[in-house]
Image (cartoon, rainbow, N blue to C red):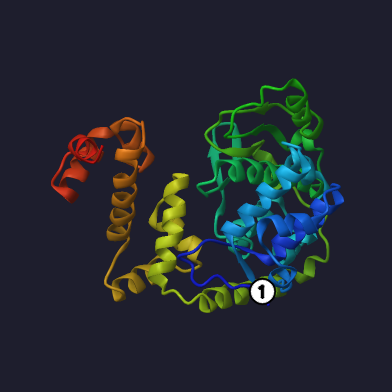
Amino acid sequence: MAELAPSLSGEFVSIALVRHLLELTARQGQPTAPVLAAAGVTPEQISDDDGWLEVERGTAMVHAVLRLSGDPQFYLKMSQLSFISGFGIVGYLLETSSTLKDAILSLMRYERLLSTVAFSYLEHRPGEVSWSMECCTTDAVVVRHMEEFHIGVRYLFMRMVKERRSNIVSAVHFRHPAPPDAGQLAAYGSIFNCPVLFDQPASALILKPPALAFPLHQMAPGLKESLETHADRKLAEMMAAASGSLLSQARAQLRNLLQCGQASRERLAECLGVSGRHLARQLQAAGSGYSELLDELRLDSARKLLPESARTIDEIGRLLNFSDGQTFSRWFRQMTGQAPSDFRQEQG
């Protein structure tokens, strides 16, 4: 029987996505039985496509694949073997979208059906649009490989657009540094037929602004509405099946958003699939509010970062979405009665 995450205060990944990744792993030449054994996952635990697997077990599987394959670019290369229908109902929604923008917005709306630790967003800047994704876990290795995989899949998805990819994607960005090995660096060029830049603020496809309006080669366009109805029902079931309250769900999602630098009332409501007004009412009924929740998570992170991190006070403040170190220091003093520097010295 598949495991259901006990609550959204824990992070999880859908078994449908896990099974897709395992299928691609086998296609890439790596047997999956040793991967499951190394990660401590049984076939029974991934037998139900409607179930969920704790993200810690998914993380163990990623490490097992990298260790057993011996290929540090396994997931980057594997992205080019992917197929949209492998992402279940989310993939079908992309295939039935009318334009690239419609597809991206569908992904942003329903990606929680795949995982609670990956987020997409669009940023409009002068002369370009950034279609970004971030994997928000504490495991840097998993973040790197999952972001490479998903950016590779998104680039592959551009084949669905009725336009040459050179007129759609102007560059690919990755948050991680460039590999020092020339052969590994060349692999990016063989996949992405455009400039690839590293050490960027976000992992993203940089699109040319007109690209959002480009039509897609739609598969069964008349199914879009019924698929959305089904996806909305699955979202509601997912929220109901998780035993945690909306407060615990909001806390888990906001922690992820804070790690990604995307914390806001609007983004939190969007991730939870509710309106901002409904979120405010439910948090109030639970005796909390957005500001209180944000302060709680910021304070918890600050107390961990100050004694354990080599970052400066200003860097920690910006990491926690404060405008500068002084603003962070004033807030920390109000919350604890201590300056951050005094707390660091006391705990050091």
Q: Is 184 situated above or below 268?
A: above
Q: Where is residue 123 in the image (x, y as percent from the top left)?
A: 54, 42
Q: Is residue 211 left or right of residue 4?
A: right
Q: In this view, does 279 lie to the left or right of 94?
A: left
Q: In which quarter of the image is the N terminus?
A: bottom right
Please indicate, yes or no, whether residue 159 appears anywhere in the rendered image: yes
Q: Position of residue 234 (x, y in %)?
A: 62, 75
Q: Quadrant of residue 14?
A: bottom right
Q: Where is residue 166 in the image (x, y as percent from the top left)?
A: 78, 33
Helix, strand or loop for disc 1: loop
Q: Where is residue 248 in the image (x, y as percent from the top left)?
A: 40, 68
- Number of residues whose C-alpha sits closer than 10 Å to that of mark 1, classed few (under 14), some (14–19) or many (20 or more): some
| Residue, disc 1 | 2
Residue sitting at 64 percent across and 62 percent down?
114
Give the residue type that dot 1 points to: Ala
- Number of marks: 1
Please indicate, yes or no, whether residue 98 appears anywhere in the rendered image: no
Taking the view exactly as shown, the residue that stands out farthest to the left is 337
Q: In which quarter of the image is the C terminus?
A: top left
